[in-house]
């Protein structure tokens, strides 16, 4: 395992264990509302501190971009961290959430870890070396037809500027697939796409820390990730379409007629 991935795994497991211990006691957590339907708990913050400490202890000169504490440092190496993806699920005792850590080197995603503490599932990827779930090599699904496919998504829930276009896409995907799921953690949705559990995925308005690790997992598992217009601007725009190559292409075709200017980027 690449030494930087190894450190990221250590950080993700530490944070995951902390989150798992805290899940026994969710009724007593201090929770703050960041904006409408956007909550943060002391667990998100403690997990993020543990991750940053572990990474910077090994690589003091690296930079950080983390959901709760923002950006720190300047380096060709940037760690992109979501300490707890799926906070709403976590706060409701709904067991679908994960730690997500990615490393960007000179702007290119190079290492990725997504750790699901309730299932002890560790998803990892290194650029050029494939994607894994625990010790098993991951491949995206082989399904060829949209109508046979299971598609993951996330609903808009804090900002609603793309709501109408999203609902139009949602209707079309609903009528042209075998099923749609909204599990509540974009990081795990992408990891599941890498693992072939989902054949495709789309969501709008995501942040770099929601998707950085998951996107590398998918490309290393032989899948395709793009923005909703089929371009590579997804980390910046937060609009994501992903899947195995067949389903990614068919999803883009379904999405195309509904693209507003705001969703093209
Ligand atoms: C959220 C989850 C969710 C997605 C949201 C994200 P958080 O992350 O990934 O699935 O739909 O857009 O913000 O806030 O739980 O870290
Ligand atoms: Ca997130
Ligand atoms: Ca989070």
Image (cartoon, rainbow, N blue to C red):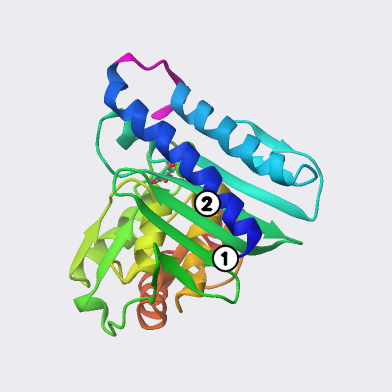
Of residues 114 and 170, the one nearer the viewer is: 114
Residue positioned 76% across, 47% down in the render = 62
Q: Is residue 6 magenta?
A: no
Left or right: where 27 falls relative to 137: left
Left or right: where 62 falls relative to 187: right
Element type where label 2 sits in the image: helix
Locate residue 23, reporting x and y percent. 31, 29
Quadrant of the rendered image containing residue 38: top left
Indicate if the residue with disc 1 has its beta carbon within 8 Å of ligand 2.
no
Task: Give above or below for 43 relative to 71.
Answer: above
Q: Which residues are magenta?
A: 28-41
Q: Is residue 207 visible?
A: no
* Contact check, label 2 and label 1, Cβ < 8 Å: yes
Locate residue 246, reporting x and y percent. 37, 83
Residue positioned 45% across, 75% down in the render = 221
From the image, which quarter does the N terminus lie in? bottom right
Q: Which residue is tagged 2? A: 9
Q: Which residue is tagged 1? A: 1
Residue positioned 52% across, 27% down in the render = 45
Locate residue 230, reporting x and y percent. 52, 73
Of residues 183 and 104, the one nearer the viewer is: 104
- CA gap between label 2 and label 1 equals 10 Å
Left or right: where 232 falls relative to 29: right
Locate residue 171, reporting x and y percent. 25, 61
Q: Any mark on residue 43, and which?
A: none
Task: Give above or below for 216 relative to 10.
Answer: below
């Amino acid at each position: 395992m690449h030494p930087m991935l190894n450190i990221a795994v250590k950080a993700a497991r530490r944070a995951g264990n902390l989150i798992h211990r805290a899940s026994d006691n969710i009724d007593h957590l201090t929770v703050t509302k960041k904006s409408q339907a956007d909550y943060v708990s002391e667990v998100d913050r403690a997990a993020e501190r543990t991750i940053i400490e572990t990474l910077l202890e090994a690589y003091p000169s690296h930079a950080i971009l983390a959901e709760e504490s923002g950006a720190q440092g300047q380096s060709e190496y940037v760690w992109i961290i979501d300490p707890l993806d799926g906070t709403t699920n976590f706060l409701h005792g709904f067991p679908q959430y994960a730690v997500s850590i990615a490393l960007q080197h000179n702007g290119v995603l190079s290492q990725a870890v997504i750790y699901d503490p309730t299932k002890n599932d560790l998803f990892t990827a290194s650029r050029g070396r494939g994607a894994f779930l625990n010790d098993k090599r991951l491949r995206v699904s082989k399904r060829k037809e949209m109508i046979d496919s299971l598609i993951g998504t996330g609903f808009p829930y804090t900002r609603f500027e793309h709501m109408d276009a999203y609902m139009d896409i949602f209707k079309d995907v609903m009528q042209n697939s075998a099923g749609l799921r909204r599990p509540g953690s974009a990081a795990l949705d992408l990891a599941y796409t890498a693992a072939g559990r989902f054949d495709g995925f789309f969501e709008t308005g995501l942040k770099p820390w929601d998707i950085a690790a998951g996107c590398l997992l998918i490309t290393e598992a032989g899948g395709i990730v793009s923005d909703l217009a089929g371009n590579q601007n997804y980390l910046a725009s937060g609009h994501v379409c992903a899947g195995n190559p067949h389903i990614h292409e068919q999803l883009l075709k379904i999405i195309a007629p509904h693209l507003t200017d705001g969703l093209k980027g």
